[in-house]
Amino acid sequence: MSTIEKAIRQSVSLPSPIARRVKALAKSRKVSSNRILVELVETGLRSKEEEKRRFLELADRLSASTDAKEQQALKEQLARMTFGE
């Protein structure tokens, strides 16, 4: 027997340009705006989790590395991830 997750009603205010994009996407895919918002949030959460995983992987590689050139390259990658380009 599968467990059904209980939906929680959440009120969210969107800037009008984003709301228009959500409605247009919903209309083009023939689904509700709510469904689009749920998918976008799920995608964003997965993206953040993946970004964190990549960061920790680079940090582990940095701590395990003994090569000065590799360490510098890893530090630069971590800095870009943290502070942007």
Image (cartoon, rainbow, N blue to C red):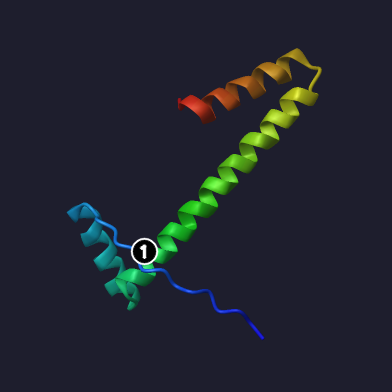
Image quadrant in which you'd find residue 40: bottom left
Q: Is residue 3 left or right of residue 26?
A: right
Q: Is residue 56 left or right of residue 15?
A: right
Q: Residue at x 73, y 31 (%)?
A: 60
Residue sitting at the far left:
16
Q: Residue at x 68, y 29 (%)?
A: 59
Which image quarter holds the C terminus?
A: top left
Q: Is residue 77 left or right of residue 41?
A: right
The x, y position of residue 2, in whole percent, is: 63, 82
Q: Which residue type does callout 1 highlight?
A: Leu
Q: Residue at x 23, y 59 (%)?
A: 19
The x, y position of residue 64, in whole percent, is: 80, 25
Q: Residues within 10 Å of mark 1 (few under 14, many from 20)?
A: some
Q: How many marks?
A: 1
The x, y position of residue 30, in whole percent, is: 32, 78
Q: Is residue 72 left or right of residue 49?
A: right
Query: Which residue is nearer to you in this view: 29 or 41?
Result: 41
Quickly name the residue at label 1: 37
